Amino acid sequence: MRVLRLVIFLTLVLSVMEILLFGITRDITGQQRLNVPADQNIVTVKGLKQWLVEQYPAIGKLSSLAVAVNNTYAEDEDNLTPESEIALIPPVSGG
Amino acid sequence: MSNRYIRQEQLAGFGKAAQHKLREAKVLVVGAGGLGVPVLQYLTGMGIGTIGIMDGDQISLTNLHRQVLYAENEVGQLKAIVAVNKLCKLNSEVKFNTHTNFLDVSNALEIIVGYDLVIDASDNFGTRYLINDTCVILNKPFVYGAVQQFEGHVGVFNYQGSSTYRCLYPNPPIATEIPDCNTAGVLGITPSIVGSYQALQAVKVICGLEGILAGQVQIFDFLSNQQYILKVKTKPENLAIKSLQRQYDTPVCEPAGGELTVTELLKWQEEGKPFLLLDVREQKEFAKERLAFAQSYPLSALGQQLDNLQAHLPMVAICEIGGRSSTAVKMIRKVYPSAIIYHVIGGMEAWLDEIGDQYIIEPHLNSPER
């Protein structure tokens, strides 16, 4: 029983969604990747954005921010699973 | 007949047919800076028939670490002219069109219409959106490229029904939101790598080679050496643009202001940020309970008081629950179109719920009739 509980606990802890960060989102968070704790129960892109803005209000101020799920531009209503590969890709203007 | 392109023509999968397509092609390069220099050098070397070079900027000493086509003794000269002078020596078979002005709303359509393909080698969002919209209207593909710090983007938009820049980023950022090369810095080599990829994509589009990044952005992380491909879906409304906007300048300050939460309002006050808090509830409500730093501008009399506003300061309108304050914002904006003005979501009710009685003045509690 204890072992089973440990397995469930580890599964929950380890099944975090990982977010790749680019551009200004790296400056805002000070990180290159973010982990979303599994207990946040985030199942849509919209939910992810809300969580991000709670953690980092400056992200909410960006005029445009592309969210990619499995290398494809994602809309707010698109679903996320723990296996989703997520990336935040803000605009870049330099040349 | 010269054999200058023999090394390309002998390449399997390219050959004389592709070389002929390069010679027939007309390409406009917008921007002759960090991205534009490698684009121009390689398109010239490879034998594009007609190249337009568009840049109204002059060479500065701080350009030279990345714009290696130019030299110290050319500082102060126009990039477009210096570039053409040098490039025509590299390949005298190429026809060059020199455009010594910047792309803007007044010239974009008439210039771009003369080309088959546009290279966006610009350095600002306004030009990027202008290139996008003009290319959509004229049904021309364009090769997008951008750099920021150690990151680079390359992609091909509006190619045979593919997505556009607006499908990726619907709203232009405000000027201070995303740092550019002048503020964030750029390593000399990185725009050159991105520009070279742009030139490669341009050749692929012209010759119909495989691996065109149509509706995709290839993102380079030059520090970790990782690459990432983002596929952008076409949003049909973005292909339906029929005319240019009146202007494409990136807004320099928060244009609309917008909404402010009570937490943000508290933060502004605690940070000592200069702003006017306009309480637009009626005088009775104001007298009963108000924020210590608010000034009374009742909505019913606001029309007459608009002339007295210090509209050079950011303004924040507040009411009981957030309805009247949003009306007040619209009234003020009509008179002061460029004013920075917010309204507080949830109004005084939200303040009392979330912040409590901090900064709250309730004069009626001290009045004799209580």
Image: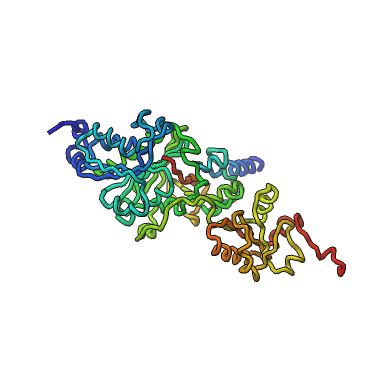
Q: Nearer the viewer, residue B136 or B236?
A: B136
Counting from the top left corner in percent of width and height, residue A2 is at 66, 41
- Asked whether B194 or B252 is in front, the reply is B252
The residue that appears at 65% across and 49% down in the rendered structure is: B273
Q: Nearer the viewer, residue B7 or B264?
A: B264
Q: Can you give x and y, in whole percent of width and height, for residue B304 in the image? A: 62, 68
Count of number-bearing discs:
0
Quarter holding the C terminus of chain B is bottom right
Q: Residue B148 in the image: state x and y as whole percent.
A: 46, 39
Q: Is residue B254 left or right of residue B123?
A: right
What scheme was used to colour the molecule?
Answer: rainbow
Q: Which of the 4 quarters of the picture holds residue B93?
A: top left
Residue at 27% x, 34% y: name it. B85
Q: Residue at x 57, y 38 (%)?
A: A30
- Left or right: where does residue B228 sit relative to residue B361? left
Looking at the image, which is closer to me, A12 or B69?
Answer: B69
Image quadrant for the N terminus of chain B? top left
